[in-house]
Image: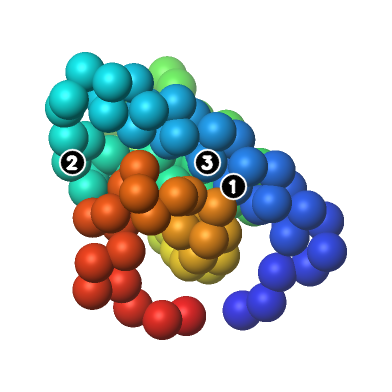
Amino acid sequence: MNLNPTEVIAAGFAASAVIFILRLIYEIAAKKKFTVPDWVMVVMVYIAAFILAMIFTPAQLPVFPSGGDPSALVPAYLTWLEVLLTYLSAVAVVATVFYVFILQKVKDGLNPALAPSAYKDAPKA
């Protein structure tokens, strides 16, 4: 799956925002002699990727069923849940593509002196 130019531009802006926030966190932590765990960067990048994926993957959910006979509502609820999970799986795939792209840009933009653990055993993209 490839990103179109609009998605690449949006991912670039998201990467810039994540880099700015991470640099701020790492600099404050360095002044207070505190080490930031690796998962902070990973979580921030995936949240940004998931938000971008939700923006670029339009939701087409049916109307939530309400009222009526319980024997008709249960299949309607299950159908709605199935459509929701299908949508979220598509978003997760797009978010993974954004994640790989943004993570590489974040690692390129961070100073290794501020976040040395981000560069330890990092896979090459």
Tell me, yes or no, whether the two marked residues, 2 and 1, touch with CB atoms within 8 Å. no
User: Residue visible at 32% across and 64% down?
Assistant: 119
Residue 15 marker:
1
Q: Can residue 62 be seen in this view?
A: no
Amino acid at the residue labelled 3? Ile
Residue at left 17%, top 25%? 33
Instruction: Point out residue 74 in the picture as x, y percentages from the top left corner.
Output: 29, 39
Q: Is residue 80 above or below residue 23?
A: below
Tell me which amino acid carries mark 1: Ala
Q: Give the alpha-carbon distance from disc 2 to disc 1, as whole Å.
A: 19 Å
On the image, numbered disc 3 is attached to which residue?
19
Mark 2 or mark 3: whose residue is earlier in sequence = 3
User: The residue tagged with tag 2: helix, strand or loop?
Assistant: loop
Q: Position of residue 3 (x, y in %)?
A: 70, 69
Name which residue type carries label 2.
Answer: Pro
Q: How crowded is mark 3: few (under 14 residues within 10 Å), some or many (20 or more)?
A: many
Q: Do the residues labelled 1 and 3 touch (CB within 8 Å)?
A: yes
**Residue 62 location in percent, x, y?**
58, 41
Furthest-right residue in this view: 5
Residue 125 in the image: above or below residue 69: below
Image disc number at residue 37: 2
Of the pair 103 and 64, the residue shown nearer to us: 103
Q: Are marks 2 and 3 in contact (CB under 8 Å)?
A: no
Q: How far apart are marks 1 and 3 (CA)?
A: 6 Å
